[in-house]
Image (cartoon, rainbow, N blue to C red):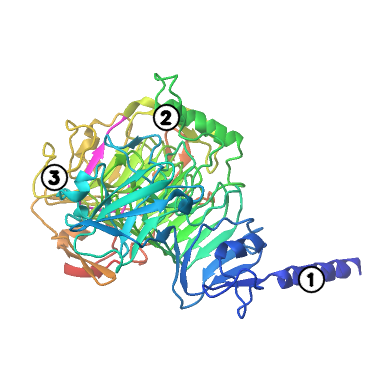
Amino acid sequence: MIKLKSKLLSLLLLIAITGSAKEYHVSVNGNDQNEGSVAKPFRTINFAAQLAQAGDVITVHAGTYREHINPARGGENDSRRIIYRAASGEKVSIKGSEVITGWKKEKSGIWKVVIPNTFFGNYNPYKDSINGDWFNNHGRIHHTGEVFLNGKSLYEKETLEKVVNPVADTKIQDVEGSTYAWYCSSDNMNTTLWANFHSHDPNKELVEISARPTCFYPEKMRLNYITIQGFSISQAATQWGAPTAEQVGMIAAHWCKGWIIENNVISDSKCSGITLGKERGTGHNVWSADQENINRDGNIHYIEVLFRVLRNGWNKENVGSHIVRNNTIFNCEQTGICGSMGAAFSTIENNHIYNIYTKRQFSGAEIGGIKFHAAVDAQIKNNRIHHTGRGIWLDWMTQGTRVSGNLFYGNDMEDIFLEVNHGPFIVDNNILLSPVSIRTQSEGGAYLHNLVAGAVFTWPDLNRFTPYFLPHSTDIGALTTVLGGDDRFYNNIFVGQGNDLSNDTSNIVNPWDSKNKYRFGLAGYNQAKAPVWISGNLYYNGAKPSKKDLNQLVEPAFNPGINLTEEGDHVYLSMAFNQSFTGVKTQMITTEVLGKAKIPKARFDNPDGSPLKIDIDYLGKKRSETNPSAGPFEKPETGELKLKLW
């Protein structure tokens, strides 16, 4: 009888909790004095965000909302989230910008507008310049603000003369666009903007300027279990997101757990689109701020930040475990997605990330389609990443991470860069088609069933002591340098360019050391200090194996004719497979085969600690248990094939 009463009480409590959940509606025709029903909706999303409790849903109807959403609270668990969603079938835009009219013509193509500083409230992006650790301003000021003509950003210039007489930048993608320019000047009362709109009349076109530093960011930390779904989010004046700083993108998780960011279109951020990063209390651009200790480099400062973050509760129970999926992210000048430590235990999947770092007016060591520090047990899979400069950059403390089934092309720095990590991490079933496919300054990696059509570059780092963890946690084991090696390359296809380009770097962006040698294939591992395990790989068209390679098949004269085409929203790969494709001896790759990474003494396994098995190919096909095909495609037909990749 007591048990029955207890069950009945629990059921009544569950019904009460479920019944208390509300759905608030927001419309551009609404009013924040309304009740928030579908018949009487609110006007602003942020007003609803102050009312929402765990389990509530905020449904936003068609229109453009120019506001910063600053939630008051998060959900309680995965089943009692606070959900922000665009109404089904309706286009909802959230913008960090404002429309500007009243432009005065100065001369042909040149227009001017004077804006009172009161227009910007407590934040003026035309007084705020981009700055932070590892940021390179190229000797000039870059404001966080931006000017947009019909949705396209113009190029900021450091003088008015360069706006009046712009010179096209022939080194970037958008040569013509680089002549659409703007300049700003501010005093205590007003901000003045000049812009070269060429033949366009800004009073007849849509001209917007960035006016807010973010679009969706809770000022409170640790608001967990929030879902952001189905929006178009753009045009925020975001600041540089250094790993030693508070990282605030257009959507930014503030040191919390369990967010889902899905099915959004995210574009035109001055710096980053999505940030899953560090908060401010453990340090904000600490290297730049520490002028008294000029002999202490960024390496030491980041280690100090790491220990402060650990004291601040960085672990799986409190931080990370986000899901970022099915988003389209483009036109961001720092990163599509970034995060220092806050992206641990997260899943990043099925995102289309492109046109990142294309204007190239500034640079720095934190740029890429995806840039993570400490991506512990992160899963980065099935993303399409192209024209981003650097595709994925996994920097410091990449452990338990898996990069799987991603499509890379058109990245002129490299597809994947792994910097000063000790592993274990896994790179499998990826298609890497840029001039440099893999740049690794790490150890303890497993590269499995990839198609590698660019160069591979590996080198040690004996000067930086970087941390590693106990398996599947953020508990630090110790710190050490990167000796190099301790990598596994099984069942990959390497394609060269017809000859060994070991000494030819003319077609490859190498921002550090022109003396370093690139190689198509794995000959760079001939000098690896630590043991390496290399077997079951194919080498075509001049790609060369390592001397440590076993069971390889080398066909220097065979060119598979790799060609990628974009047809609408789809991507196709044309590639020839000859009879020799089945001639290489391979094996099914498992946790047992891969062993343990040398430094952390940790297995290559799943995030939950269960054994790993690479038995599914890029297209979802089951692999042979006894002799799986090299590369990302299992048992393709002989001859030239056209495969749909996206």
Q: Is residue 280 magenta?
A: no
Query: Which residue appears at 24% of the width and 30% of the height?
Result: 527
Q: Amino acid at mark 1?
A: Leu
Q: Is residue 451 above or below residue 312?
A: below
Density class for disc 3 (Cα within 10 Å; few <14, some 14-19, many ≥20) is few
Place of residue 530 in the rendered image (x, y in percent of width and height, measured from the top left): 33, 31
Query: Which residue appears at 84% of the width and 71% of the height?
Result: 8
Q: Amino acid at mark 3?
A: Asn
In the rendered view, does 247 fall on the left or right side of 38? left
Mark 3 element type: loop
> Which mark is in front, 2 or 1?
2
Whole-Å distance between the Cαs marked 1 and 3?
67 Å
Mark 2 element type: helix
Which of the numbered marks, if any, corresponds to residue 288? 2
Sequence-wise, the earlier of marks 3 and 2 is 2
Place of residue 124 in the rendered image (x, y in percent of width and height, measured from the top left): 44, 47
Place of residue 301 in the rendered image (x, y in percent of width and height, measured from the top left): 46, 28
Which of the numbered marks, if any, corresponds to residue 11? 1
